[in-house]
Amino acid sequence: MAESLLTAATESLIGKLASGVVKEASLMVGVHHDLQQMKETMVLIKAFLLDAEQKKPHNNALREWLKQIKRVISDADNIVDDFECEALRRHVVKTYGSFTRKVCRFFSTSNHLIYRFRMAHEIKDIKERLNKVAVDGHMFGLQMIHNDTRVVHVREMTHSHLDPSNVIGREHDKQKIIKLLRQDGHDKRLSVIPIVGMGGLGKTTLAKLVFNDTTIDECFPLKIWVCVSNDFELRNVLIKILNSAPNPTEKKFENFEMEQLQNHLRKTLQHQKFLLVLDDVWNENRTKWDELKEIIDVGVEGSKILVTTRSHLTAAMMRTKPSNSYLLDRLSEEDSFSLFVNLAFEKGEEKKYPQLLEIGKEIVRKCEGVPLAVRTLGSSLISRVDRKEWESIRDNKIWNFPQQEKDILPALEISYDRLPSYLKPCFASFSIFPEAQSIVTIHCVNMWQALDLVPPPKERQTINDVVNQFLRELLLRSFLSDFVDLGTVYEFKLHDLVRDLALYVAKGEFQIINRSSPKIDEHVQHLRFTDNNLLDQDLVPTGLKLSIFPMKATNEAFLNTLVSRCKYLRFLELSFSEYKSLPSSIGKLKHLRYLCLGRNEKLKELPNAVCNLQCLKTFNFEGCIKLQEVPTGIRKLISLRQLYITTRQPDFPENEIANLTSLEDLRFFACDKLESFSEGIKLSSLKTLGICDCRNLKSLSFHVVTNLEVFGIANCGKLDLSMGLDNQIPSSCLNLVNLINLPQLVTFPRWLQGSMNTLHCLEIIDCENLMELPEWISTLICLKIIRISNCPKLLSFPDNMQHVTSLEHLEIKDCPELGKRCLRQDWYKISHIKKVIIHEPEE
């Protein structure tokens, strides 16, 4: 399905060619006219590609033509990016002068002439290749389609977690499962109940309905949900179970030995009647199952395990007795149609379109009772009332292809085809994430921004806003599962069939290298390596744009080869590696937009050459606890939007940071020798500031928060947030404030009063000496959420707390006196709040 990703790549390149940066640089080099001719040719090619997408080519010659287009578009994209790099480098030289002889030589007159000659030669070659493929397009009978009519019609989201009212036709199944769970067997063995059925039937949805039912809460004091997927290694499953169980001491089980894991899990389950859900199990190895069952069979009589699986062999192996298995059937045609109508129309609107309803019934029949198929197709028709559009789905040839049980559902493929071209490469990029991983907004921001999969933000918009909009559109098409809206951040997963679709459409573009698939595709551009032992590949594609290294990576020779050979890298992920240094040649990766070295605990120094990466937007060396200092010249990274820092230097180069005028997100972690920011961090662009584990930090200028939206301070034992206060309270834009483990916090910092018109959420955790909240808290007219945990000296709320009328959510935990007082004599202060959660102290 290469043509679907090609259209988006062509559109992106056309947009770049129209940008002011490329125009300025190309005029300077004297190739502007040539680039405009390239742009006109690509507009023609894009028109052919839109038709090729709809025809789904099976002709070998046409597929070869598409491969040629892919190569020439990729090469053209690299050339256009080169202009952007050139413009940024010139800006740095103009701003800071000839800061090194090397750069001075780079921008000498003779070198400029060489650059001009080289670019002119490469552009001429690209033009000739583009013209050839444009002419060849007529040979295949392709029509020219100039407008992509596939637009996502956005409607308001109604839920973030599972909403039972959105599930149709499963009430009978739910009651049957609950009856099986509540049955008390005559034997004392741990009872196992599998829900078995083909992919897309809604086994996980049904298990969630059961898990969240109030009658189940009454039966099982302890409930644990674990998504297993293909990973049934005993150690990993034990860790997942422990991570999902109540964990008041917040232990990190990943570092436990097997014996410790077993003992801790037994202790967790003993003397409790529990329900354990093992979702999406594929294991058919009885030995592995017996090992796990022996460890967890320690609960009170009546404890149950609920399993969801596609495999009848797995179900037969795990179930306690044959009558315990629950075979999930397809939805009835009536329920399928009700679900389809709910998704395709706004409430009540379907009555206006009787002809569409008749076509809809025929589409639903083709879905054969599979809810996932019904959902994706129904979602793709939101507010679409063109009869021909509905008929094109009903009559699509994909329905006629022979289907095997493990094939991608035709309905999913049709729904993908109907996505606007700009969403297709974003969806394909999900294939690079590990199976069953939770994906959050920042993952998409980092990748999509680095690979130019999203357009630049408009005025008063951030890249985060653009990405969230794309994710909402994919959610409305039912491509995302377990979707949680956390305000400015979204979290979600992919159904395994949807991930299969992502792998299918991304083939040849994105690839995960693992033991079962160790060979690198010759033309692949985005690679994830899962094992350190796989970093010995002789053939690394020179056109590589994304590379994600495995944890504990140590192969320096491979890293050197990759950096020197793959000069067009945009995204390099080296987190949790064990490199002591980076090759200085990394400074030649002038196209690099994302460089992550997070938690690289052996890294002692960074080459100053990284400061030559003027396209870099994200630079993360958080948790590099042996790093002596920030590289000299970091001010030259003028495109930076995210900077995460760990350093051992006592004086931070604030004047360097002050020049990063595009910086939106700045975080300091474990800078143990840092005592203060003498000048404050004065960046008008900064939206997020986080400071964590800076144990000797004593003061922070309150002016730092003036333009921030998100502000978090954690584990800074010597920091006094009230220091540096004068008589004037600055106005600020704060939306979210987290104050965690700050023993010096006794009274609330007055400068927070400046965010009275913006503050939405306030979290105060482990501030053991905080005595009171201020009277002026009533002036925070937008405050909706307060969470307070483990603040034992905080005894009551101010008398005017009931005047905080905007407050909707209040949560109090491990504050014994405050909790008691609120439930008794001070209830009148908080009775107006919609949701109040006061955790009773543990005995």
Image (cartoon, helix red, strand yellow):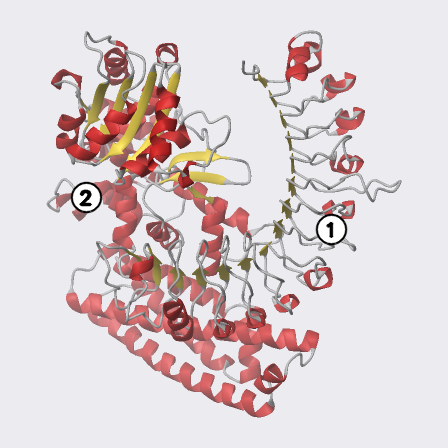
- The kind of secondary structure element at disc 2 is loop
- Residue that appears at 78% across and 55% down: 679
**Image quadrant occupied by the N terminus:** bottom left
Dot 2 surroundings within 10 Å: few (below 14), some, or many (20 or more)? few
Q: Does residue 288 sit above or below 148 in this rendering? A: above
Residue bearing the label numbered 2 = 395
Say which amino acid is labelled 2: Asp
- The kind of secondary structure element at disc 1 is loop
Q: Does residue 333 sit above or below 692 in this rendering? A: above
Residue 43 visible in the displayed image? yes
Outermost residue toward the right? Answer: 727
Distance of label 1 from label 2 (alpha carbons): 69 Å
Report x, y in % for residue 514.
Answer: 27, 55
Report the label total: 2
- Residue that appears at 67% across and 54% down: 685
Query: Foreground mark, 1 or 2?
Result: 1
Residue 389 visible in the displayed image? no
Say which amino acid is labelled 1: Glu
Q: Which sits in the foreground, 824 or 128? A: 824
- Residue that appears at 42% across and 41% down: 255
Report x, y in % for residue 41.
Answer: 38, 73
Earlier residue among tags 1 and 2: 2
Q: Does residue 593 sit above or below 829 in this rendering? A: below
Residue bearing the label numbered 1 = 675
